[in-house]
Amino acid sequence: MVSPDDLRLIHETLKREPTETELACFENLWSEHCSYRSTRRLLGTLPTTGPDVIVGPGDDAAIVRFNDDIALAIGMESHNHPSYVDPVNGAATGVGGIVRDIISMGARPIALMDPLCFGDPVQKKNHYLLEHVVLGIGGYGNCIGVPVVRGDLIIDAGYDGNPLVNVVCVGICKPDKFITGRVKEPGNHLLLLGAPTGRDGIGGASFASKDLAESSGEERPSVQIGDPFTEKLLIEATLAMIERGLVVSCRDLGAAGLAGASSEMCSTLGGHIYVDKVHLREVGMTPREIMVSESQERMLLEVRPADIEQAMVLAERYDLICSDVGQVIAEPRYLVTYEEQTICDLDIHFLTEGAPKCIWNSTPYSALKPYVAPKGSLKELCLNVLSHPECASKQWLYEQYDHDVQTRTISFGRDAGLLKLGTDSMLGLSCGCNPRQIMLDPYTGTANAVYENAANLACMGVEPLCIVNCLNFASPEHPEIYWQIEQCIRGMGDMCQKLSIPVVGGNVSLYNESDETKTQIPPTPSIGMIGRAPIIVPQKVKDGDHIYLCSSRSSAQEEKKEGDGMGGSILSALTGCQGTPPTCTETEILTSIRDAAKSEAVVITDISQGGLITALATMAHNATITMPDGIDPVSFLFTESYGRFLIFGADKTVIETALKTCALTELGAVGGEGLIIRCKSEEVRLLPEEIKQARESLTDLMRPA
C-alpha cells in the first residue's frame, strides 16, 4: 500500500486522483526495494570510480575492465523474503534475476556466488529452508549452465525467521561491446521477449520491503516461479540479438515487473506502453496485474523499427514469444494505454526519482561485553569449533552445484574461487561477511569484511578489481538499526578507499525481521569481490611441509590483551566468552601475501572464522605444531584477528625470502597421525577420526540418510 504521506504528495503533484494502475506503479517503484529511499544518501558516500570501472552503479550491472580483450559484468541481488515463503522458487528466481541483469548488459554469465545466512539447521524449519534454498540455487544454476564457484554460510539464531539468500553473478563481454539499460532514440520500439506474463510475483517489490509476519504463507503469490530451461533460451536469444546489433538498450524484468523495467529504461526520454499487447499466460488479467507482475524469464529490448522483423525471427528461432509492447517517446512522460484508453499518464521523473527520501532517527548502542575465559578443555573447544557449521566441511553444498560447466573453473573450495579467462589470466572471486562481529561494532566489522575478502583473494595471488554488496538489515525505522546502516556503509567506504577498491553496484534489503519468531537479523552487509591474476595452479599441502604463522611486523609487535579478537568469533558464539572484535589496521601485508602466493612453492590460507585451529584442520589435518612461549592457548587457537596467515612449504628459504617483510613464526610441520598442538602446559592431540567427525558434521546433518 502507498503510505498516507506518499499519497498526499501524489495528490498534490498530479492535482487529481491517481488511477489504479498509477497507484500500483507508485507502490512498487517507490518501495524501499526499488527506490532505496532510506539509503540513497548514504550510498552516495561510497567510492565508485577507478581506472578499470567502465560502468558503475545505477544500471542492471556494472562493467569493469579485466584486460584489453575482456570486460566483466557484475551484479549482486537478494531474494530473502521470497526464499522464506517458498525456498525452492524464491532462491531459484533469485539466481534467474541476477543472471538476467548480466545478460541485459550484453554479457554472458560465467559464474555465481551465493552467500547464505540461516538459523541453526538442527531445527526442523531451518533445516527445511537451507535444504530447499540450496536445491533451488543448484537446480536453476545447473540447468542454465552457470557454475556456482564460491559461497558463504552463516548460521545464527538471528536468521530463524528471516534467512538471507544473496547471489552474485559475473559475466564476460568485449570492453567496447556492452549495452546499457537506458533508451537512446525516440521512435524506437520496446519488445517484450520471453515467457508469458502471469499472476506470480505480483507485488514482489513491495513485498520485499515488508517484514515477514505469521501470515507469510498468504504472500506465496508474491513469489515468482522460475523456469531455467526458458531462461537458457532467453540467454542465447538475447545475446544473439545483441551480437547482431539489433538491441539498442535492454533491461530485465525484475522488481516491479514491466512497470519497473519500462519506466526506469525510458527515464532518459519517455515511454509509452501498450499493455494490451503483452503476451499472457493467464486469461482475465487486469492492466494493473500485467504491469506489476514479476513473472520470470522476460527481457525488455529497445529495437529500431527497421530491426523489429529480424528480432522477431530470432525470437522464434529460440522458441520464444516476442511482443511489440511500446515505444520510446521524446516527452518525459510515462504513458500506459489499454485498448486505446489511457490508464497511466505520469511525469516519468516523478515516478522514477520522486520517492521522498527517508532519514530515520539514529541511535548508537554498545554491545561489547568483557571477555570471560571459556570452560572446557582445549581439545573439547577445538572439536566444538570444528563442528560448527561455519567451520565444518561444506561438501554437502559443493556436491549439489556443477562447478565445472563452461570448463573455466580452476578452483572452488579454497579461499577464493578461480576461473581461467583468456590464455594467461584468471578471475578470482570471494564473498561474505561476519555478522556477529558487525553486530558488536558495525563500522569495524564491515571494514573487516572488505579486508577479509581481499585477504581471501590475496591467498590465491589475486589483486582485487571491485566489490558489489548486498546490505541486509532489519527495519531502518528502529533508531539502532539505522545507526547500524550508517556505520556499516561508512566502514565499507573507508576500507575500500584504503585498499583502492571501488564499489560498483549492489542491493539494499531492509525490513528483514519476523513477527513469527520475534527476531531481527544481525546487520549483514554481505560483500562480493572479484580480482585478476596470472594463472597459477593451486598446490596442495604435502607431508613434510613447514608451517609458518605470518602477520605484519607492526601487528606482531602489538601488545595483545586477553579476549582481543574473540568478540563475534565462533568460540564466542559457542561458549559466550565475549571479548572485543578484531580491528584490522594493517593492510600492506596483502601485497606480500599476494606476491608470495604466485609461487607454486608455497600454499597460503588466511585465518578468519574459527581461528587458527580451523585454518589448520582445513588445510592439514595431520600436523604437529608448537605454540610460542608466553601466549594464551585459547587466544592463540581461536581468536579471529585479521591480517594473519598460515604458510605451508617444503623450502624454508623460499618462504622466508618471499615473506621477508612480514613477521614469520615457525609453528611445526605437516605429517603424522592427526593434529598435535603443543604448548608449555599441555599437549592437545586430535585423532583423525575425531577431526573427520567434526569436519563432516554439516554434511551428516544435511545429507539424506
Image: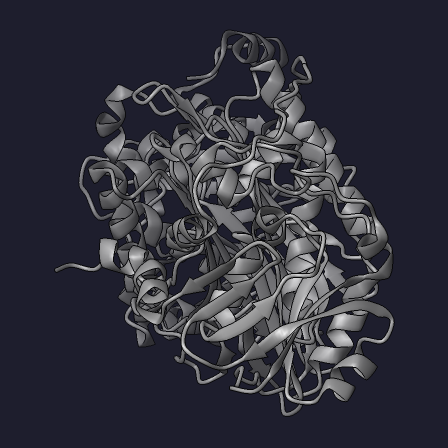
User: In the orientation shown, which residue stands out farthest toward the front?
Assistant: 681
Q: Quadrant of the N terminus?
A: top left
The x, y position of residue 33, in whole percent, is 51, 33
Residue 62, position in %: x, y? 65, 58
Percent position of residue 393, x then y: 38, 63
Color encoding of the figure: one colour
Q: Quadrant of residue 39?
A: top right
> With respect to residue 607, does 14 lie above or below?
above
Position of 704 with respect to 241 (left or right) is left
Work out which quarter of the rendered image holds the C terminus and state it. bottom left
Visible residue check, residue 169: no
When the figure is inspected, residue 96 is found, relative to residue 262, above or below; the finding is: below
Toward which corner of the image does residue 594 lie, by quadrant? Answer: bottom right
Q: Position of residue 210 (x, y in %)?
A: 42, 24
In the image, residue 382 sits, relative to residue 66, either above or below, namely above
Say which residue appears at 61% left-offset and 71% top-offset.
428
Taking depth in this image into account, of 503 and 127 the one nearest to the observer is 127
Q: Is residue 627 visible in the rendered structure shown here?
A: yes
Labels in figure, total: 0
Q: Is residue 155 left or right of residue 284?
A: right
The answer to which of 15 and 97 lies nearer the viewer is 97
What residue do we see at 80% from left, 64% from top?
589
The residue sitting at the bottom extreme is 423
* Residue appearing at x 62%, y 14% in the figure: 479
